[in-house]
């Protein structure tokens, strides 16, 4: 495979992206968490969360913004911001959820995550939010460290299900600074 271009561009996903997004999302989730979960639990979660029909519904939802990070024509990351009430441990009323945030392993460490987070904050501002909240698996120290570097702070825990397996996620809240001119 030829090397990826250094320039990353972020764009809003369109309905025609559903199939590619479904495949990418399922692959990156499984690569990230597959080794730490039972295969049957992982398959149940992937089937419920990342099919093409599910992605089509999410892309059509006006309360969801799905952002794609691409290098050339290659999808290297994606994020999803959605209007959803935060858990009780989040005190800020003007919050929006950062529901998904994934960067493909070959693109990690190349600035994609920072560019994608900037686009996430732009999307959050477009929804009128001043804070982002998210949940991240307590056993994912790399992601927790990234979010801390981005200004997120721990605000408690919540339950996340992978199939029938109950897991604990940390709830983090981070700022959406005003847009710079």
Image (spheres, helix red, strand yellow):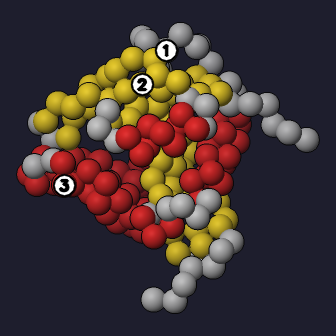
Check disc 3 and report the residue beneath it.
Answer: 35
Callout in the foreground (1, 3): 3
Q: Which of the pair 3/97 is nearer the observer?
A: 3
Q: Secondary structure at mark 3?
A: helix
The quadrant of the rendering that contains the C terminus is: top right
Name the residue rendered at 38%, 40% in the picture.
Answer: 141
Image x and y of residue 164, in percent:
11, 36
**Residue neighbourhood size for the residue with mark 3, other residues' Cα within 10 Å, grouped as few (<14), some (14–19), many (≥20):** few
Dot 2 or dot 1: first in sequence order is 1
Q: Quadrant of residue 143?
A: top left
Callout in the foreground (2, 3): 3
Image mark for residue 171: 2
Dot 2 or dot 3: first in sequence order is 3
Query: In 3D space, how far apart are the residues under numbered discs 1 and 3 (Cα atoms)?
Result: 31 Å
Please determine whether, in this image, residue 168 is positioned above or below residue 181. Answer: above
Name the residue rendered at 47%, 47% in the picture.
Answer: 101
Q: Is residue 144 visible?
A: yes
Residue contact between numbered discs 2 and 1, judged by CB atoms under 8 Å: yes
**Residue neighbourhood size for the residue with mark 2, other residues' Cα within 10 Å, grouped as few (<14), some (14–19), many (≥20):** many
């Amino acid at each position: 495979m030829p090397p990826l271009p250094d320039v990353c561009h972020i764009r809003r996903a369109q309905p025609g992206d559903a199939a590619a997004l479904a495949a990418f999302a399922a692959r990156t989730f499984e690569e990230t968490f597959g080794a730490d979960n039972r295969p049957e639990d992982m398959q149940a979660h992937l089937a419920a969360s990342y099919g093409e029909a599910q992605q089509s519904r999410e892309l059509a939802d006006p309360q969801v913004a799905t952002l794609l990070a691409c290098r050339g024509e290659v999808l290297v990351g994606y994020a999803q911001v959605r209007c959803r009430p935060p858990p009780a441990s989040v005190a800020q009323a003007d919050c929006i959820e950062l529901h998904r945030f994934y960067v493909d392993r070959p693109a990690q460490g190349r600035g994609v995550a920072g560019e994608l987070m900037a686009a996430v904050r732009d999307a959050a501002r477009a929804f009128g939010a001043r804070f982002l909240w998210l949940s991240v698996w307590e056993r994912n120290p790399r992601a927790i460290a990234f979010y801390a570097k981005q200004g997120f702070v721990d605000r408690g825990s919540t339950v996340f299900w992978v199939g029938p397996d109950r897991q604990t996620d940390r709830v983090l809240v981070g700022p959406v600074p005003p847009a710079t001119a």
